[in-house]
């Protein structure tokens, strides 16, 4: 605990009138975490926290979120500054290495990643073997999980520094290629191989569409930055959990990608646009859907609204909303779902139900509208999120391995049947 910024202190926990002193870990911004790691041994109790709503699973120096005040920083840098001023590859370096790169360091990481843009031909064969209509996120997970078969040296990704970085750069280099192949397969279009002349984002767009519009490349670069990391979210926590068994990096990332697919997490960006389209098809009555979202008997939720950590505006959503207007304008796109989104947002923000629960638009509320304007089909939206989140996942995995965190293995409170004897089937 003493290696942390700020002093540590203790609190007392009284169990049946016996006081147990527990040390408190204090973070950079005075966040406090009570260390209960020895509680079972000293008191016979575990803590119970389904969904980890109140549990810090690790110490981390990568990303800071203040959900009450709507603040997000990577390695200390505010997301608003990174989105406006940095490139996605600068942010990659920042997340992985802890500092912004100088010109040589940036050129180095760009070169290392570019050298890994040729993905194995077997990936195409693998994607071709999947049925038509497969969801792109499923295809992406399959392709990611196959990488150790093509690169057996990655099986022990942590064995030495050289293998570690080779494994990381290869993944960062392959990801846009695989994501573009997934798109081409899902559309039954011929694959386009990478063009080594192009930068990371332009190359991805080239492999997707066979051409690169600089306005789109610029917009996408910013969107990828806005998705690059988000501390211990469901997919990053999954990557850390899987990686804590010391399985290879690619297996951990494939698992994180599957976690991202869910509609309560990254899959929400697809669901938001589908929701907006169905509201439009239903006559555009946003109030009707606000009422449905408030009705506890109705399973409908306002997708793209609410967040486990933000009880204020998601700062990424603020940037994306302003950006959506700008991009649609630049691309000369008039999308009626943007009006529906704005009406929904304004109604929700003025509604007591949403105010009381502190439900605000999250990163997924407006991102899908931009992806749509960029010509990306709706079932590819979460793949775009994964492309942006990859440096975050890798950095979280790297930090977890560097810090020597133990294997993730929660406890439970057993509530099933107590011991009983087996009976032959004829007596049951
Ligand atoms: N629409 C309507 N009501 C909502 C919504 C919503 N989108 N989100 C939360 N609520 C309500 C809940 O019903 C609950 O009400 P109650 O206190 O009366 O029971 C209260 O707000 C708290 O919600 P929880 O579900 O307990 O909050 P939790 O932190 O577990 O869930 C989550 C957060 C999953 C993001 C939730 O807000 C949600 O389902 N949102 C819609 C899906 C979404 O946009 N996901 C993307 C999140 S961002 C990301 O992962 C990239």
Image: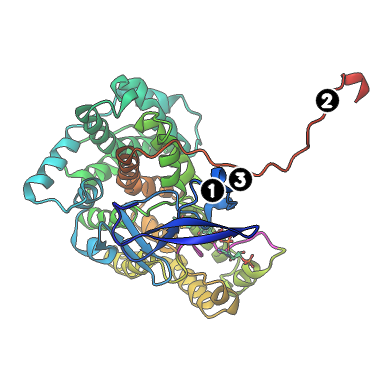
Q: CA distance from mark 2 to mark 1?
A: 33 Å
The quarter of the picture where the C terminus appears is top right
Residue holding disc 2: 421
Q: Quadrant of residue 366?
A: bottom left
Residue 208 at least partly seen: yes
Numbered label attached to residue 39? 1
Q: Residue at x 28, y 59 (%)?
A: 5
On screen, residue 296 versus residue 114, left or right, reads right
Which residues are drawn in magenta?
298-309
Residue 182 sits above or below residue 34 on the image: above
Q: Residues within 10 Å of mark 3 (few under 14, many from 20)?
A: few
> Of callouts 2 and 1, which one flags the residue occurring earlier in the amino acid sequence?
1
SS label for mark 3: loop
> Of callouts 3 and 1, which one flags the residue occurring earlier in the amino acid sequence?
1
Q: Residues within 10 Å of mark 2 (few under 14, many from 20)?
A: few
User: Marks 3 and 2: in contact by CB < 8 Å?
Assistant: no
Residue 308 at least partly seen: no
Q: Nearer the viewer, mark 2 or mark 1?
A: 1
Q: Main secondary structure of the magenta part?
A: loop
Q: Residue at x 50, y 59 (%)?
A: 272
Q: CA distance from mark 2 to mark 3?
A: 28 Å
Q: Quadrant of ligand 1?
A: bottom right
Residue 275 sits above or below residue 127 on the image: below
Numbered label attached to residue 44? 3
In magenta segment, residue 399: no
């Amino acid at each position: 605990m003493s290696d942390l910024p700020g002093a540590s202190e203790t609190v007392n926990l009284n169990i049946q009138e016996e006081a147990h002193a527990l040390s408190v870990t204090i973070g950079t911004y005075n966040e406090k975490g009570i260390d209960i790691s020895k509680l079972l041994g000293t008191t016979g109790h575990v803590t119970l926290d389904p969904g980890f709503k109140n549990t810090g699973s690790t110490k981390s120096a990568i990303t800071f979120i203040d959900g009450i005040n709507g603040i997000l920083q990577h390695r200390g840098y505010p997301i608003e500054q990174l989105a406006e001023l940095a490139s996605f590859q600068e942010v990659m370096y920042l997340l992985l290495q802890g500092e912004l790169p100088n010109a040589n360091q940036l050129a180095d990481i760009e070169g290392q990643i570019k050298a890994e843009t040729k993905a194995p031909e077997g990936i195409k064969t693998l994607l071709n073997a999947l049925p038509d209509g497969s969801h792109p996120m499923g295809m992406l997970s399959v392709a990611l999980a196959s990488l150790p078969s093509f690169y057996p040296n990655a099986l022990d990704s942590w064995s030495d520094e050289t293998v570690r970085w080779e494994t990381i750069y290869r993944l960062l280099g392959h990801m846009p290629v695989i994501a573009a192949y997934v798109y081409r397969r899902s559309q039954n279009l011929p694959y386009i191989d990478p063009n080594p002349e192009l930068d990371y984002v332009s190359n991805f767009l080239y492999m997707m569409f066979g051409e690169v519009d600089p306005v789109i490349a610029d917009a996408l670069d910013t969107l990828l930055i806005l998705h690059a990391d988000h501390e211990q979210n469901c997919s990053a926590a999954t990557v850390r959990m899987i990686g804590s068994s010391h399985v290879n990096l690619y297996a951990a990332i494939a698992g994180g990608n599957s976690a991202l697919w869910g509609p309560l997490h990254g899959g929400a960006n697809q669901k938001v646009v589908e929701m907006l389209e169905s509201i439009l098809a239903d006559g555009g009555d946003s109030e009707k859907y606000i009422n449905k979202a408030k009705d506890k008997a109705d399973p409908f939720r306002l997708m793209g609204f609410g967040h486990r950590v933000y009880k204020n505006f998601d700062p990424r959503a603020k940037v994306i909303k302003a950006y959506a207007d700008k991009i649609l304008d630049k691309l000369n796109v008039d999308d009626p779902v943007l009006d529906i989104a704005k009406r929904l947002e304004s109604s929700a923000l003025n509604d007591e139900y949403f105010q009381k629960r502190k439900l605000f638009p999250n990163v997924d509320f407006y991102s899908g509208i931009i992806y749509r304007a960029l010509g990306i089909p709706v079932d590819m939206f979460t793949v775009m999120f994964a492309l942006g989140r990859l440096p975050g996942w890798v950095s979280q995995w790297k930090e977890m391995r560097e810090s020597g965190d133990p294997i993730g293995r929660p406890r439970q409170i057993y509530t099933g049947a107590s011991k009983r004897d087996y009976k032959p089937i004829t007596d049951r």
